[in-house]
Image (cartoon, helix red, strand yellow):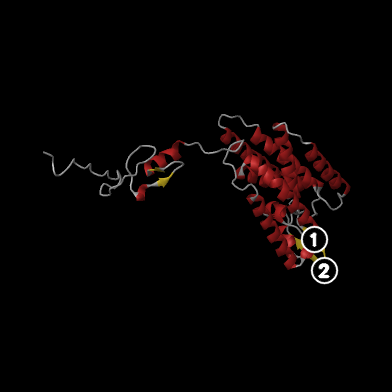
Amino acid sequence: MTDPQGPPVAAAPVCYRHPGRETWIRCQRCDRPICPDCMNSAAVGFQCPSCIKEGARTTRSPRAPYGGSPSANPALSSIGLIAINVAVWLSISAAGGGGSALVDKLALLPRTTLFGNSDGTATLVKGVSDGAYWQLATSVFSHVEVWHIAFNMLALYFLGPQLEAILGRARFLAVYLLSGLASSTAVLWLSSEHTQTLGASGAIFGLMGALLVVGLKLRANVQQLLFWIGINVVFTVTASSYISWQGHFGGLLGGAVLAALVVYAPRQRRATFQWSSMAAFAAVCVVLIGLRIAALS
């Protein structure tokens, strides 16, 4: 005789996270049953939330060659900096251009000076030595002539992404901004006390100096970069009557030093060394600025 009921039927598995839900799907990693709400697409099949979390914890994040996270879009920071410079230039143009009060506010002037106007009047412009400390930063983002901002932003567009791809976004921005600070420091010490200076050229020269150091570190062919730097140095010297060689020199030297601090940092505690040394660089600039202000005052 046979059993009319037939062989027993095995009970359907239930999701290990939701015991009330039957499922025949299993996690490809731990083989536990999972319901549709717990299914995460994997390279093959599905994985449960616990395995996804564990995989994310144990997987090493990609790193830039000299520490930090690589930029998903290395051009993004440069585009942001260009946008800031263009916005400031448009504001200056709308305010009246080179003779506007906005330029007097933003341009770097070491010492308070009385400037004569075309109508026979005079304007007293406040300088860094009398408390206009913001000029050390704002001057790096200010331009008057269209050729000036066009040349600087074109150079930033081509040089910036190359450096950010190697250093990562945070270190690239640090090199750019601190090169600008080094440029302002050199202007404060080496320029005429009564001459206004503005433009991103010092920070751009900082990118040139940084790329040169990185290229030498990587043993790359830097002949084209040296040629580009040489042309700009010659142009700076020959046109020194209206171009700030002081700012260019300070930016170039600052960018080279900052890049060296990043790429030659020891592997052990690399990030700590990089950020602490760049903070020390900024502190040196601040001390030099303070000493110059004291002398001018």
Which residue is nearer to you in this view: 152 or 29? 29
Which residue is nearer to you in this view: 243 or 80? 80
- What residue is at 79 percent from the left and 46 percent from the top? 246
Density class for disc 1 (Cα within 10 Å; few <14, some 14-19, many ≥20) is: few
Q: Is residue 56 above or below residue 36?
A: above
Q: Which quadrant of the view contains residue 7?
A: top left
Q: Amino acid at mark 2?
A: Thr
Density class for disc 2 (Cα within 10 Å; few <14, some 14-19, many ≥20) is: few
User: What residue is pinned by disc 1?
Assistant: 114
Q: Which quadrant of the view contains residue 109?
A: bottom right
Q: Which quadrant of the view contains residue 221?
A: top right
Locate residue 38 relative to residue 91 in the image: left or right: left
User: What residue is pinned by disc 2?
Assistant: 121
- What residue is at 78 percent from the left and 43 percent from the top? 249
Helix, strand or loop at mark 1: strand
Say if residue 184 shows up in the picture: no
2 or 1: tag closer to the N-terminus? 1
**Residue farthest to the right?**
238
Measure the C-alpha gap from mark 2 to mark 1: 10 Å
Q: Amino acid at mark 1?
A: Leu
Locate residue 40 relative to residue 33 in the image: left or right: right
Residue 127 position, x and y percent, is 73, 55
Contact between marks 2 and 1 (CB within 8 A): the answer is no
Residue 23 position, x and y percent, is 30, 46
Residue 171 position, x and y percent, is 62, 42
Residue 247 position, x and y percent, is 77, 47
User: Of the numbered discs in the image, which one, if any, rests on residue 100?
Assistant: none
Which residue is nearer to you in this view: 23 or 10? 10
**Residue farthest to the left?**
1
- What residue is at 68 percent from the left and 35 percent from the top? 260
